[in-house]
């Protein structure tokens, strides 16, 4: 019986060590499972942050493209305004020149009319006639010869 008791004790001690090893292995497995679960949650958070970053990058790219398009439109508009301004300046210059030319023509016509009147008066004076104020074609005196 003593030998059987010793053998039983040895067997119980071996089973105890095996159980201890199993318990330690289970603890390690549980710790590993917990770590894997924590890593999974961290990975989920990182993946979510990556998706958010990609979405923001897409939004910023779209905003940048819109901003570039607006910048190009403003630049094109400014170039058109400058071209139209240059055209308006040129048209104004031409208008001023035509106004001055018209005024010069009118001055010339007025001067020509005055010269013609003076010449007509001189001619009639030379011929001895006086032009009537209302009649642009005065009559010659009866004794005048042409």
Image: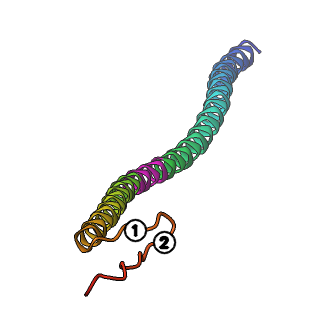
Q: Are marks 2 and 1 in contact (CB under 8 Å)?
A: yes
Relative horizontal placement of residue 12, taking residue 84 as reference (left or right): right
Residue labelled with disc 1: 131
Is 83 part of what is drawn in magenta? yes
**Label 1 secondary element:** loop
Q: Residue at x 46, y 67 (%)?
A: 132
Q: Main secondary structure of the magenta part?
A: helix
Nearer-the-camera pick, 64 or 89: 89
Q: Residue at x 69, y 22 (%)?
A: 23
The magenta span reads 71-84
Residue 55: x percent and y percent? 61, 44
| Callout 1 crowding tier (Cα within 10 Å): few <14, some 14–19, many ≥20 | some
Residue 94: x percent and y percent? 34, 60
State the residue lying farthest toward the top.
2
Is 85 part of what is drawn in magenta? no
Q: How far apart in space, not on screen, are marks 2 and 1 (Cα)?
A: 7 Å
Q: Quadrant of the N terminus?
A: top right
**Label 2 secondary element:** loop
Q: How is the image coloured?
A: rainbow
State the residue lying farthest toward the front.
143
| Callout 2 crowding tier (Cα within 10 Å): few <14, some 14–19, many ≥20 | few
Residue 81: x percent and y percent? 44, 51
Q: Of the numbered discs in the image, which one, if any, rests on residue 51?
A: none
Residue labelled with disc 2: 135
Picture quadrant where residue 9 is located: top right
Picture quadrant where residue 91 is located: bottom left
Picture quadrant where residue 131 is located: bottom left
């Amino acid at each position: 019986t003593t030998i059987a008791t010793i053998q039983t004790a040895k067997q119980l001690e071996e089973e105890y060590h095996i159980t201890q090893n199993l318990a330690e292995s289970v603890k390690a497995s549980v710790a590993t499972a917990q770590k894997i679960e924590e890593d999974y949650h961290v990975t989920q958070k990182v993946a979510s942050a990556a998706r958010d970053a990609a979405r923001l990058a897409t939004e910023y790219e779209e905003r940048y493209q819109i901003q570039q398009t607006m910048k190009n439109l403003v630049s094109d508009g400014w170039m058109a305004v400058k071209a139209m301004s240059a055209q308006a300046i040129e048209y104004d210059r031409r208008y001023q020149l035509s106004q001055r030319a018209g005024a010069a023509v009118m001055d010339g016509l007025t001067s020509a009319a005055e010269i013609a009147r003076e010449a007509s008066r001189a001619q009639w004076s030379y011929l001895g006639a006086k032009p009537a104020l209302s009649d642009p074609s005065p009559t010659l005196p009866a004794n005048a010869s042409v």
